[in-house]
Image (cartoon, rainbow, N blue to C red):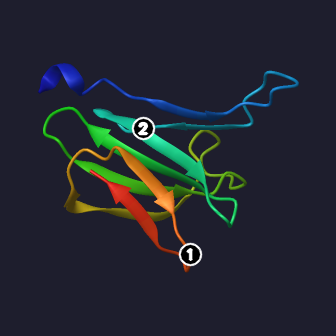
Amino acid sequence: DKKMELFTGIVKLVDMDSGLAPFQYITPDGMFPSDAYIDANGYVVVAESTFTPQAGRIVTLNPAGIGDGKTPPIIRLIEGGMFTKVWDVRQLEDDHIFVST
C-alpha cells in the first residue's frame, strides 16, 4: 500500500534527568517498532512490523556504535518471511529469544 510507504516509527532511550535522547533508531519506511528491549550485552533489540503486508523482523542494534550519525549499526537481523506481525520479543537464556506473532 503506497500510503504506508512513508510511515516510520522511532525507538528512543530517554535520559530522565536531562530529557535528552542519547539513542534513537528510526525504522525503515512502512515499518513500526512493535516492541523493544535492551539485552544482556547492552544491545537494543527491536521487533519491527508492517501494517500491509503483515510481516515482521527482529533487529539488534549497537547503541554505542557510530553508524552514519543517525542510525546505530545493526549487529543482527532476523527476517525473510519467518514472522508475520511481531507483537512481543523477549530474551531468554543462552542467547535465545521468545517471539510472539
Q: Earlier in the sequence, mark 2 or mark 1?
A: 2
Residue sitting at x 78%, y 25%? 20
Q: Residue at x 65, y 42 (%)?
A: 69
Q: For residue 27, what is the image quadrant?
A: top left
Rendered image quadrant of residue 43: bottom right
Q: Are marks 2 and 1 in contact (CB under 8 Å)?
A: no
Q: In which quadrant will I find the N terminus?
A: top left
Secondary structure beneath disc 1?
Answer: loop
Q: Which mark is residue 93?
A: 1
Where residue 50 is drawn, which disc sits there? none
Distance from disc 2 to disc 1, alpha carbons, whole Å, reads: 23 Å
Compared across the picture, whether 91 is left or right of 49 comes to: right
- Left or right side of 20 for 6: left
Q: Residues within 10 Å of mark 1 (few under 14, many from 20)?
A: few
Amino acid type, label 1: Glu
Q: Compared to 16, does 90 lie above or below?
A: below
Q: In this figure, what is the number of numbered marks?
A: 2
The residue lying toward the viewer, choosing from 41 and 22, is: 41
Label 2: how many Cα within 10 Å (few below 14, some 14–19, many 20+): many
Residue kind at label 2, given as amino acid type? Pro
Q: Position of residue 32 (x, y in %)?
A: 37, 34
Residue marked by disc 2: 33
Residue 94 vertical position relative to residue 16 in the rendered view, above or below: below
x%, y% of residue 12?
62, 33
Point out the frontmost of discs 2 and 1: 1
> Looking at the image, which is closer to me, 66 or 45?
45
- For image coordinates 50% across by 31% down, the residue present is 10
Q: Position of residue 54 (x, y in %)?
A: 17, 41
